[in-house]
Structures are given as structure tokens and as C-alpha cells.
Image (cartoon, rainbow, N blue to C red):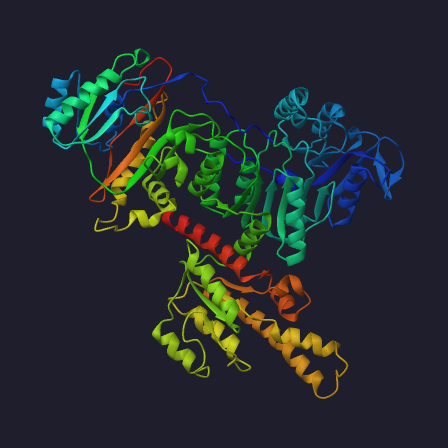
Amino acid sequence: MTENGVDLPTGRATCTLSEARSRQMVARVGIPVSDWATAGDPDAAVDAARSVGLPAVVKLCGDAIAHKTERGLVRLSLTSENEVREAAIGLLAAARPEDGPVELLVSTMVQGSRELIAGMVRNPQFGPCVMLGVGGVLAEAVADAAFRLAPLDRLDAHDLINDLGAQALLGELRGEPAVDRDALADILCGLGDLAADPDVASVDLNPLVIVDGRAIAVDALVEATGDQSPI
Amino acid sequence: MVRDLTPLFEPRGVVVTGVSAHPGKFGFVTLHNLLSCGYEGRVFAVAREPGTILDHPVLASVDEVPEGAADLLVVCTPASANEQIIRKAAERGVRAVFVTAGGYSETGDEGAVAEARLVALTDELDLVLAGPNGQGITSPPVGLCAQIVAPFPPRGRIGVASQSGNFVSAFQNYAGQTGVGISRSVSAGNSAATGIADYLEWFAEDPETDVGLCYVEGLSDGREFFNQVRDVTLRMPVVVVKGGVTRGGQRAAASHTGSLASDDRVFDGMARQAGLVRAATIEAAFEAAATFATQPLPDGGGVVVLTTAGGWGVVTADAVTTHRYLNLTPLPDDLLAAVDGMLPPRWSRNNPLDLAGGETRDTIPELLDLVTGHPEVDSIVQLGLGIQGNTAALTRSGPFHPDHGLERIVDFHERQEYRYAEAAAEASSTHGKPVLVASELAVARPDNPMVTAVRNTNRLCYPSADRAVVALGHLVQYATWRRARA
């Protein structure tokens, strides 16, 4: 009958923000992120690793770098200062001219056997939506994901959690406690709150690692509309 | 502010334009339907040729309609003539227009311009505009059949609004088949000025309507639809079928969230958030709506399966167990003890409650009341009825009837089927819980006395246990959503 639109609602161009800026944005609405710091060179990276604690993760970080894993720009499970230094040197060398200004992002290596994905996206028909899904590198292949329109109230957030097909993933699993649904609902409501800023085009929290039952974002990607940074 | 659609569904009188003496033309059929289904208001037919059609005098122009005699104008003239007609009708006091003609936005840019003009005109004249490009409306409580097609459905409590006219007819056909009727129906056509959500809003305030049933393909403003419907569902259940779910929408996206945001997933989430009950198919949608219209809302998802036959009980238990919103209620000890007193020891002593052929004349009606009334039971699915009716049918048509005592036993079997169906309805009304009777006989042998008897209680006889379970699941889903927001 009428259009099932296929364009972004505003038709405006979007750009991604660096992981560091993305983390700042999501942390501001109360979404827990793994401890992190930025560094401009290998020495600073080692200092940062010391402050967030080993084992650490070092990533190359910049506004133009949206998907780091695909380019091998994520170094995981670095257990010594030496490894951190070598990773930092290698990552800085991997930067390309089109990446623009880059820095290193050093965070604690968060361990958990379960990974979720959550995010916010603007749908042409329904406007901003919040998603929860089974996360990690296979998120799109598994495609166990459900949506609600933003903003969400707490009932909506809990219903969204209940919509996941893989409910067993949220229960007690391999000696780990069940996922704290209230805390997860807070994250989903926070994502809904981010939609109130019209310049935030989309948000990815992938993965959200479950640690002692609580979801922690170990990566964040904010896509902003137009030239104006929402920060 | 809910748009008042009373002039559309309960008009004082109706004007039809484009009436022709040719029985194959839409204008003729519409006049025929208006004159044939019990509508008591005045009907004015406007035709080019003077005289009478169907023994009904025709008018040469809308100008001849007495001032204030008609609320509704049904336009069966081609798109090009409509502006003039609508202006004149408004002058005669008409307050709502249904435009059946196509040739509007569904045809492309030029049609879209014509449609925008139509909307501007009806806005200017403060008229309700339904359509264009729709089949019409029915309103059984007032005998109104203002549509270019059949059938005219039996009266009931379901309000239908559909973006496809075919599915209005399909729901009407199911209503005729099952006896679970319709309060209002509208083929929304292009929904130029009045959309599905506008109809649902009015249905929620309509004393004739208990449940909304809608088919949706596209929404010009999905967010507005959501906002409207969310308020409706707090007052009235709404069943939706969405067409076009497989259509893409996974456009290139910078984010994982974006690439997972298929149109169907987003629609599904929106529907759940709005408290809509989304049915997978047209028949499931009708059955869900018919269930809302005829059964009380359950307090929870606990189901007891009552059966006279083993196999059906087993597969129904499977369907209940795997359903997201349903579970098999473990039989409480006091209920077990009570049933022990009613049946020989070979009964299942478990849920499904399988009588294993141990029942006598009064067992099923008594059990239905006992189990439905138990505080730990939320709902019942009753299976295995109709067997005696089937036996009666074969016996009655065989060469030995009515001798050898067969007349008496046939009568007994048939009477029993009536008792069972009535007991199911009575248990449901007495205890305020859903009691769903399911049997393939509903479609295989609709003349079975059990099927007839269920129909006589104004309830649905579900064509299979699985379909009863699906319908019951919709009730529980909605009841849960609504209770959480009460």
C-alpha cells in the first residue's frame, strides 16, 4: 500500500565515532563498560595497561575505524607489559592514511563465556528502536535478536529480554549465575534514552560480555548524523 | 481525539452513486446489498438513467436527496466524477464518504495527486473519508451491507479493518462458517484519510465491538500507528496479521544492530510493545479474534487437557508444553482424589486428563465443571468429543436404523453431544475461564451434533487441538501484557 521506506529517515550522511568517544557516550547513560584508557604511543599504552590491570586488550581507535576485528586491529589477552608494548607498536604501524587521526585504546580483558549484543537504530517506519540479541562475531549469522521502539519503559525492557529465543543463555550456565535481568534492562533503557538525541543515528554494544551475571560492554560504536558530533 | 465513525457504521441513511441497471456492475451490487440485508435506514440510489432499479426509484443527482436524510455516501462512480458528487452530498448533510473507486495512489503519481485532492476536499468539508479503492463496509447490528461484494457476515463482536478487501471477505466467510460473527467491517483501501488505527480507536469505544481484527501491509507513519494502537489495546484486544513480512529492509548498515533490523523483526517488536496479538496466518487471526470474542481472558498460562482419546491428548500436551506462554498444570492432589472417585482406576491420573474410556453418562459434564472450577486451573482444552455423534450418523444412515433399538441409542448419542458442548460453555461462563473444544469434525463433519451444539453456544469449535492451543496462547499473551500494565 504505502512505502516500506528504504532510506535513512533524515537522508543525512552519517559518520562513526571512535570507540573512545562511543564509550564516553554510552557510559553517560549508565551503561557499564570495561575499564579503559587511551594512549598515544606504546609507553603510554603500557602505563594505561598498568592502570586498568592485566590481562589487557589493545585496539587501534579512530573515528574512521568502525569494524576493528575485520582488520585485525584488536589484540586480546595481553598478559605482560611487553606484550602490551609490542601490540601497541604493531597496531600503530597498521594504521592507514585514510584512518585519519588514531590512538590506542587499552582496556581490561573481560572474561565471560556468554556474549550478547544490544543497540539502537533508527527505522524508517517506526523511528528509533532498541535491539537485544545473541552477540559476538556470529551475531548476524545466529540472528537471534528482538526489538522495541525507543524510549522503553522497564516493562518493555524486560519483555524484550524475554523475547530472546536463547533463554537458556540467560539462566545459570556452566557454574555462572543467571544474567541479572534488571541490570540488563537498565542498559536497554539507556540505549532508548540515547535515541532522544537526534544526532545519534545508531549505537552498537557488541559484545556485551556477561561477567558474574552482569552485562558489560567491551566495545561500543556510535554512528552520528551530520557533521555535528553529538559529544 | 478519536474520529467519530458513527456516520460510517450507523448512518441515518445511505446514498449510492454510480448505480447502474446492469447486475454485473459494482453500483448495482452495492444497491442490491443495501436493500437485501435488513438495513432499516433510507437508501438513495443515484443513476444516470431515470426509472427504477431493483424496484427502487433512482435519483438523477445527489441534489435530490432530502436535506439531512443520509449520513453516508457510497461512491461507486469513477474517480474523475467524485469531487463534484462529494461537494453536493456534503451540502445535503452527508457526513461520511466511502470511495470504492480505484485510480488513486495505487496507480502511481497522478493517482496520488488525485488522492491528495480527495483528502483535502473531505477535510475541507469535514467528512469522514474511507477508502478509496476499497470494497466497502458492513455493520451487522444495523443490517448495513454497503459493499461491492458478498458475503454479509452474521452479527457478532469482532470489528474488522483490513488493507486488503479480500481478507475482509475471508474473515466474513469464516464468520459465516463458524457462526462467530462480526460487529463492523471495513475494507480500508488506500487508507487515504482514515487508517487502520483510526478504525481500531473507534472500535474500542464501540459498544458493539469486543475485539479488533486487522490486516496490515504498509503504514504511512508507523510511529503514529504504534502510539494510537497502544492506547486501544489497553481497552480491547487487537489481532493483527502483517502482509509483506519477507520484504527486505536489511539495507547496508554501518552497525550490526542496523543489519539485524529487518522490517519483520522491528514490526514484531512494535506489535508486542503495543500489546497487539500478531497471528501468523489469516485463519489463525480469525480464530484468535473469535476466541477473544467468545472466551474470558485467563488469569495465567496453566492448561488442563481433558480428553476421551489418548493420541489427541499426547500431541496437545506437546503443543502446550512447547508454547512460550502456556504450560500443563500438574493436577493438584484434591483434584486427583475427586477424579479418582468419578472414574475407574485406568484413567491417566495426570494432565492430559485422559478418561481412557471410563466415562459414563454424566462424567464429562461433571468433570468439565469440576476441573474448570479448580483455583489452580487457568484454562481447559477439551478433546475427543463428537465420537458418539459420529456413531449416531453412521447408524442413522445404515440399513438397520431405526430397528434393533438403534433409534433410541442414536438419540442418546446425539443428546449427549449437546450436553457436552453445553457443559463446556457453562463451565466457561460459570468459572470465567476459557474452555476450548477442538475436533477435526469442525471441518470434516460440520453436521456432527457436537459441532452444531458448540456453534449454538456461540463459540468456536476449533478444527484441531493445535489451533486451539495457538488461539489460547494468544489469549494468555494478551492477558499477561495487559495485566502488567493495568
Looking at the picture, does residue B180 appear above or below residue B331?
above
Q: Position of residue A38 (x, y in %)?
A: 18, 21
Of B64 and B15, nearer the camera is B15
Estimate the x, y position of residue B359 in percent, counting from the top left: 52, 80
In the picture, the quarter occupied by the N terminus of chain A is top right
Count of number-bearing discs: 0
Inspect this view and state whether residue A36 appears: yes
Image quarter in which the C terminus of chain A is found:
top left
- Furthest residue in direction bottom, as rendered: B404
Q: Quadrant of residue A82?
A: top left
Residue B197: image quadrant is top right
Left or right? Give the position of B430 relative to B102. left
Residue B53 place in picture, x, y as percent: 86, 40
Q: Using the image as rendered, state which of residue B375 and residue B139 is in the foreground.
A: B375
Task: Report the residue at 71% width, 34% height from top.
Answer: B100
Near-viewer residue (A111 or A201): A111
Going 54% across and 71% down the picture, which residue do you hit? B423
Q: Is residue A146 shown to the viewer in this render?
A: no
Q: Is residue B396 left or right of residue A135?
A: right
The relative height of residue B453 versus residue A12 in the rendered view (above or below) is: below
Position in image of residue B399 (x %, y %): 77, 81
Tell me the quarter of the picture where residue A148 sits: top left
Q: Is residue B274 left or right of residue A151?
A: right
